[in-house]
Every structure is written in C-alpha cells, then in structure tokens.
Image (spheres, coloured by chain):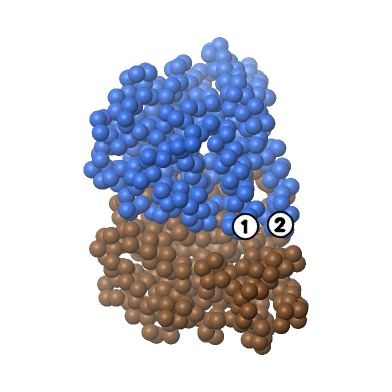
Chain colours: A blue, B brown
Amino acid sequence: MMPLEVLEQAQAELPDWQHTGMSVAEVSHRSKEFVACADHTQELLRQILGIPDNYRVLFIQGGAFGQFAGVPLNLSKPGDTVDFVLTGQWGTKAFKEAKRFGLNPIAVTDEKASNYTTTPAQGTIQPTEGAAYLHYTPNETIGGVEFGYIPETGDVPLVADMSSTILSRPLDVSKFGVIYAGTQKNMGPAGMAVVIVRDDLLDRARLDTPSIWSYQLMAENNSMLNTPPTFSIYLLGKILEWVIAQGGLDGLAVRNRTKAETFYAFLDASDFYSNPVAHDSRSWMNIPFLMANADLNKQFVAQAEQAGLTNLAGHRSVGGMRASIYNAMPQAGVDALIEFMKEFERVHA
Amino acid sequence: MMPLEVLEQAQAELPDWQHTGMSVAEVSHRSKEFVACADHTQELLRQILGIPDNYRVLFIQGGAFGQFAGVPLNLSKPGDTVDFVLTGQWGTKAFKEAKRFGLNPIAVTDEKASNYTTTPAQGTIQPTEGAAYLHYTPNETIGGVEFGYIPETGDVPLVADMSSTILSRPLDVSKFGVIYAGTQKNMGPAGMAVVIVRDDLLDRARLDTPSIWSYQLMAENNSMLNTPPTFSIYLLGKILEWVIAQGGLDGLAVRNRTKAETFYAFLDASDFYSNPVAHDSRSWMNIPFLMANADLNKQFVAQAEQAGLTNLAGHRSVGGMRASIYNAMPQAGVDALIEFMKEFERVHA
C-alpha cells in the first residue's frame, strides 16, 4: 500500500518528468536528472534511518527473495556455518534457500513449538562460534510476530530481513551487519530490495556471485552496474519525502503504535475475535485474527471486500483473517475495520 | 522510450486500477485482478511473437545483466564448454559474466578486428561439439550492429540476448533454446527480463541457482515464486496492446525499416556525417554516426538537446553520436533529427 499523495504526485509527473519531456520510467539512468533522483533517494534514506557513514546503501533487483540467495553468496563460502532464527515462514524460506549454496545452516532458535506465535526471549539467542552471520526476520507477516528487541550476536554479523517492518519505527542501524528489505511493503512497488551493508562485509563475496547481486560491485558502481529499476527508485524517493512529512520515523512510530494498540485492544476485549500471538511478540504491521466459528471466515472476507476493506484473508497456509496495516494505512482505516467487525459480530454472534 | 498513448493510459489508471481503489503498483500479486493482468500480458506476448506451445514465458527480475548469470546457472554445469559470438560490448559482458561460474567459455567468433562494425558471414559460425549452448547478441546497441539472420547451431541450443531488438520485427522463436530480453528498450520500464525458454531446457539448472532465477521453479510457479514486479508486467501488457494496434510485428517491421532506411540513406548521401557499420550488419534500432571533425560533437549534442532531441551522445566507450530509434520512436522523430542535422551541417560544413 502506498500513500495516496505519493500516487497522485507520481500520476501528475508520469508522462513528463522534470520537464524532460519523458517519463521517469523511460528516462536514461545515466541522465543527470535520474542520477540526481537516485542520489536524492539515497540521501533521504540515510537521513531518515540515521545510517552511519560506514554503511553503504544499495538498490538491488530481485526483492527480498533474491537476497535469500544474495546474503549467503555475499557473506559466506561453501562449508561455512550460518545461523538462522526462525519465527515464521519468511525466515524459514531464507533458511531453505541458504541450503542451495553448500552451507551448513543451523536453526539456532526455532519457535515452531508455539506454532510461530512467539519470539525467543531476549538474551536467549546464542550464535554458533565462527558462524559467517546470523539471520533473523524482525517481523513475520503471516504469523504477525515481531521482535521487540535487536538480538545481541557479538562478533557474528547480524543480518535482518526487514521487508515488512523497515520505516515503521526508529532503528539503530549500527547493530547490524546487513539489513535488507523488499520494497513492496513500506517502500513502494515490488521488484527491488534496499540493502544496507557495513563496509567491512563488502569483500566477502564468492567469485560465483552474480555481478548484479555483488554488494562490492554494486557499491563501487553506486547501484548502477546495470540499468537500475528507475521507476522504483523514483517512487521510493517520493515515499521518503512523505515519511519526513509524517514526522519521520518518530512520527510514524506513534501513528503505527496507536493503530496497532487500537486493534489489539479491540481483539483482546472481544469474545468473538481473537489474536493468537504472545503479547510481547505482536506485530505493528500484520495482525492475524480468528473467529471461534471458522465457517464464517469466507463470509467475513467477502462482506468486508464489499465494504471496501480488502486483502483481509489470512495467508492460505494459516487461514483465518489478517489485517496488514503498513505505514500508508491511516488510523481511519483501522477504525473502519473495527466498526465493520463490530457489526459482523452483532449479526453473527 | 515508451509510446505516449501507453504512458497516458498508465497515468489515468495509476491511483485507481480497475476500480480496485488501489494502484496496480500496490495491488496484491495474488489478487484475481493482477493474476488476470499477468496472464493477459503473457497471452499477448505469445500471440504477437507466435511462441510455440513447447516454450515457457517467464518474467524474471534483474534485467538482461541478471540473465548473463541466469543463463549459465540454468543451462550449464561447472566445466562445461559454452560458446559465445562476440559482436560488441553486451555480448562481451555476457561472456565475462559466464566466467564467474566455473565454465570454459569460448569466443567462437569475435568481430574485434573490425572494431565491432560487422557480424560474421552467414554459415561461418561453428559451435563447439558438446557445448552447453551458444550465446549471441542479435543487436548490439553501442556499435549499432545487428544480425540479418539467425545462426544455425545444430544440436547446440541457441541463446539470444534480444533486449534491444525484441518486438522490432517478426521472429521465428522455434529456432532458439532461450531468448531473453531486458524490458527497458521495447517493453517498458527497467528492472525485469522476459525469458522465453524451450521446455526441454528447464531441468538443467544447477542446485546453486538462486530460486527466483531458476527457470524451472519460475515455470512451475507461473513467474510468481516471489512477488513479481507488478507494475512492469502491467505496463508490458499495455505496450503489447499498442504493438497490436500498430499492426503487430509486421506493422512495426515496416515502420522500423522505413525509419532506419531513411536515416541510413541520409548518412550515406552525406559527406559531413557517416556511419561506420557494414551495410549487411546495420541495426534498425541504434544508429551511430560520426562527423569528420569530432571537435563538433559536444556542440552537436548540446544544440540537439535544446531542440528537444535528447540522448544523442554516443556511448562513452566509442564517442561520436548515436540515434536510438526503438519501437516507440515515430518516423516524425527521425525526420526531425535529419532536419536538425542538415541545419547543423549548413552552419558548420
């Protein structure tokens, strides 16, 4: 979901961008206009996240799933041990993908026993000595499980798939070796990953890393080794301007916390609806909910869609319902959903 | 460059697509609307190119440079011999990228002696016996060199990087093992490659092929193993509708041939401008040209830009000027350039 203001700006500029007579979707990536646009986007991201000078910001094609391969290729060599913390399906996919690259991936923590409704207690994650990195997923979209803390991993570089939580609240980037995020949640259209990588990790790539996924080559070429996804970089810049207009990450954090608390409070007070996630692990972005009578799920989703409340079906692997309330979702959207749910309960309880 | 009609349609639909109340850039890729859109795009491409039933059409992130790695990972194993025909810089980049993957890449033909102004004579390309595939670049954008024929390679699968020539004229897909093309020339915005792969080549991928680049996994998942670049697929569909409105590839071929012939005729009749490419190897899409006095180049490019004729500087590696006249460039654009060039010659000759 993207802010309507951003879409309207993009709409106004689509056929003629910056008086070039061309669309940003067709302008040359070597043009001074586009180079300035990409620099501006990167500068805004650095400012908003407070990215330290010893980190590089890369725009890489292939989204987060691409980085499930990109991270092992860039940070490990065959035979290395790599650690994973599993709190849901995305982390598990990253774990499985790592197995393609001749590694020894270890699930140092796996919350399967709780059916992925928990995060490990703070202080309990123990990286393997000598591991090339430890990977975790701060927010799992399907289970609606989010870490309330950043794991301490000592000398083992911490790698995070922040696709569904980046820009939702302030972040201490200096705790991480690599942060990556597919853009399609809080950062624009699908197709690109933002990768934030600490300088000292740039030179670890295997020779057989595809060039356009090599952190070092992309850093040396300012993400323009090949033609970058110009429209995605442009739209990300617009979204970052919107983030600043919302008061930056502090402003968005207040807004996101309020949205989430409103919805959880409603669910917890209800006998008709429930949320299965442990209180200290509840996501601000994705809130699954269940009804005691699961036979009503289809009806709920269909009637909600008629009321303009879309995308409420839970992931096909877990069923139930799920509200995804990313940055662009206003409080009014959450309030409207709650009103709909009250009425649905009134009719069906 | 994209047709203005397409950009205007995309503009009109950007904030609210198909009455979903959402932009196609934010809609779920699992929604029935988007699945229908992606199917429609693929169906149009099959129809326009006459793609046989034993070929799969894949939408893969990372553009053509991604496929420089994707092809060796999908079609060869370490130690294999792979053949390359080099007629310019893009083929040479693909050749170099293949070296990352433990292969024995052989340049069976290299037109370096002519400074990449020629293609090999028909019938002279000899694949290595047992080669995993033979790769060539039907159109080289920087040198403006295009094949007038499809090489015969017998049992060795023929692989073509068609980024800058696809959809410019009819094509016999059945001659190829794999065709791939970055979308940013004749097929929309940057960030995606279309890959057309023959069924019998799907099962050759190495285990360490990143999943989102595995032809087999992408074929099994109808290009939706991960979130696809929805906006790019949507825009490609619009462009394909435009292609049909132009009379399909037959219609575009007439138009492109006329544009190119007009421009080459002007250059060949001139003592002031020249084109260095052999007559049988001249590109319909990219036409480099030189002036005897290279000191005038900067002035030419700057004055042309003032006259609204942009992107005329030659690639930095070869200098001079270059007109890129992709599908979306109308005859009037070529005529306007010729008029400008006549006036420039009148002042400076």
Crowding around mark 1 (Cα neighbors within 10 Å: few <14, some 14 to 19, many 20+) is few
Q: Earlier in the sequence, mark 1 or mark 2?
A: 2
B336 relative to B209, above or below: below
> Could you say where residue A216 lies in the image, as x and y percent from the top left?
41, 48
What residue does disc 1 label? A31
Residue sitting at x 65%, y 69%: B298
The foreground one among A246 and A218 is A218
Q: Is residue B49 visible?
A: no
Q: How many marks are shown on the rendered structure?
A: 2
Instruction: Please state which amino acid type lies under the numbered disc 2.
Output: Thr
**Dot in front, 1 or 2:** 1
Chain of the residue where label 2 is placed in the rendered structure: A
A109 relative to A5, above or below: above
B78 relative to A296, above or below: below
What residue does disc 2 label? A20
Determine the CA span between mark 1 and mark 2.
10 Å
Describe the element under mark 2 as helix, strand or loop.
loop
> Could you say where residue B273 lies in the image, as x and y percent from the top left?
64, 81
